Image (spheres, helix red, strand yellow):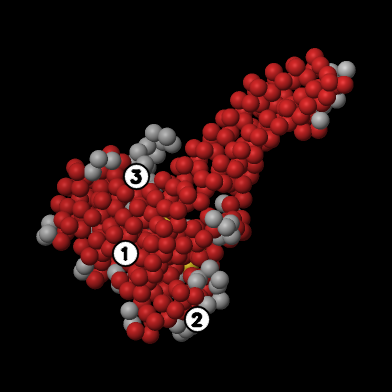
Amino acid sequence: MATTFEYKVRDRGGKLIEGQLEGDSMQLVLNKLREMGYLPIAVKPKPQRGLHREINIPGISNRIKLKELAMMSRQFATMVDSGLSIVRSLGVLSEQVENKELAKVLRAVRMDVERGGSLSEALSRHPKVFNPLYVTMVHAGEVGGNVDQVLSNLASMLERQADLQHKIRSAMTYPAVVLSIIGIIFIVMMVVIVPIFQHLFKSLGGTLPLPTRIVITVAHDIASIYLLVIVAVIALIVFAFRKWIATNNGRRHWDSFKLKPPIFGPLVHKVALARMSSTLSSLLASGVPILESLDIVSDTSGNRVVADALQEAKKGVREGQPLVEPLRKHEVITPLMLQMIDVGEQTGALEGMLSRISDFYNGEVETTVNNLTTILEPLLIVVMGIVVGAVIISLYLPMFDYIKLVKTS
């Protein structure tokens, strides 16, 4: 019986197209889409009631972490390399992994493979766990007969990404804690300290300086019903911002802005280049054609500016240009990266050069992250001093006027 598949493809002009197509298997649907002149990005069976339907309850469902997926891929590669069959390896993995959601997915994948489906086809049924990059690389491994090597490459790539995420989150913990403390101190001063001085000034009379009146007004607004209005406005701004960056134009402008700030801009830039070069290297090493590799990397790059550069590069490569030529037009691609890609194309070792680029920028990111706390610590201390100092000075400004009045009287 024919199955309905949902697909995402790109036409000859690079436009993303989504639709549905019926077929007896995923491979037949892929072949049909290629015959139609499309480049498949993602193909998966349409969810049906009672058939591989995944129920995810926000806040309750187990989230599969990148580190867990990397560990599973490493174990999978080791088992297959040791001579175990795909089905038996999946059975062992489903019993070993600690994450219940991942175990459930692996059991479903095993059942699909046992029914005669390919591993990549079974993995594609779970896009929330295995993205198009993962599925495409596994499919390339199946075609080339080196699934164990591809899984090992995937594990290495995921391990690098997980390690990078951990380092960035660790570096951001300190500023997040300090900023939270600053916010708590500010609210306590506004709600507790400022009203005491306000009653004192009211009993003494006189005209208060402008900074003092501003602080008292802010404290009154925070302690009154206006706090709800402020929270509502902030929530509305956040909601509107999330809607804006969900659009193509908004995401492009936001990703472009993230590359510009003095401290975090270079870090975001290096992370994007490291991720792009690592992913492209892994795809090419697994035997995925360069046009399909560029399409997948652009969709998984995490930055729309980098994705635009890769889409432009794909058009150039399709027209017969070397990969480096269309990339020269984009400032997001650094001169060092251009030189190494050029050398890689000339020597026929492009995937090796891309791997070296990834290692270089990963090292740069690690150095930046390690120094981030040192860079941010004095800035955060200055911010705390300005916030607390401004409030204290504003509260004590009227005291000087009252002291002068007492002395003159």
Q: CA distance from mark 1 to mark 2?
A: 26 Å
**Disc 2 target residue:** 325
Please state which amino acid type lies under the numbered disc 1. Answer: Met
Pinpoint residue 376: horizontal percent, then vertical percent. Answer: 52, 48
Name the residue that disc number 1 marks: 137
Q: In the rendered image of this protein, does residue 150 appear above or below residue 187?
A: below
Residue at label 3? 64
C-alpha span from label 2 to label 3: 39 Å
Q: Residue 244's x, y, as percent?
A: 62, 50
Residue at coordinates 69% horizontally, 35% vertically from top-left?
Answer: 390
Task: Name the residue type under label 3.
Answer: Ile
Name the residue nearer the viewer: 31 or 310.
310
Label 3 to label 1, Cα distance in Å? Answer: 20 Å
Q: Quadrant of residue 132?
A: bottom left
From the viewer's perspective, is the residue at label 2 or at label 3 nearer? 2
In the rendered image, the quadrant that contains the C terminus is top right
Q: Is residue 238 left or right of residue 219?
A: left
| First in residue order: circle 3 vs circle 1 | 3
